[in-house]
Amino acid sequence: NAGVMQNPRHLVRRRGQEARLRCSPVKGHSHAYWYRQLPEEGLKFMVYLQKENIIDESGMPKERFSAEFPKEGPSILRIQQVVRGDSAAYFCASSPTGQGAQETQYFGPGTRLLVL
Amino acid sequence: QKEVEQDPGPLSVPEGAIVSLNCTYSNSAFQYFMWYRQYSRKGPELLMYTYSSGNKEDGRFTAQVDKSSKYISLFIRDSQPSDSATYLCAMSQAGTALIFGKGTTLSVSS
């Protein structure tokens, strides 16, 4: 009964490098979401994807950040040219298909990104 | 005014106490209300999910939604040290992103 899997759990990057975060949803879930959690802040929505489609990216910074959820394989959150302000915990969530599916989200353990 | 307000605490109670956690919100269009529990350095875990107004009970946990007051609550009966965590409220309209509160840190002492 595997839940949402994320890897790596911890990622250290130097300023200017790329960070690539992976998320494998619960088996059978075709909706994926990415959130960012800064210290002393709540979870902030970034992007909502279905297989091969971006549904809502209203919370995604306009530059350097991108996300995908291919037909096969995990969802990827990519941060190019990282800066220290990108240091945070990044959580992926997934939900099943069906009415109200967007609201019943199950979260992974997160990837903690540290930018030096 | 923020969309979702939640007192960060910390809230400290003795084992066996009844705990009340609350959130207020400003967007009357919210229809879906959730409570998540997050242990330190872990991902949020869905505890309770409620659609529209009313009460929902699951074991020691009761969620209440009062849409007229834009106020939601989570009650924990017979609190245990294992309940020590951060509790996040979240809400959304149909088809839109979840909006989270900042979380309330709860500590239950034995």
Image (tube, grey):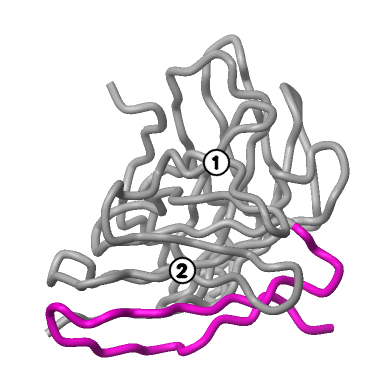
User: Looking at the image, is A8 positioned above or below residue A96?
Assistant: below
Residue at the spot x=43%, y=38% of the render?
A: A58
Quarter assignment of residue B37: bottom right
Residue B45 located left or right of residue B3: right
The magenta segment is A1-30
Residue B90 located left or right of residue B56: left
Residue at the spot x=48%, y=18% of the render?
A: B27
Q: Nearer the viewer, residue B57 or A65?
A: A65
Residue A46 appears at what percent x and percent y? Answer: 44, 51
Residue at far top of view: B68
Q: Which residue is mark 2?
A: A77
Residue B26 located left or right of residue B60: left
Q: Which residue is mark 1?
A: A56
Q: Nearer the viewer, residue B21 or B6?
A: B6
Residue B85 located left or right of residue B76: left
User: Looking at the image, is B95 positioned above or below residue B44?
Assistant: above
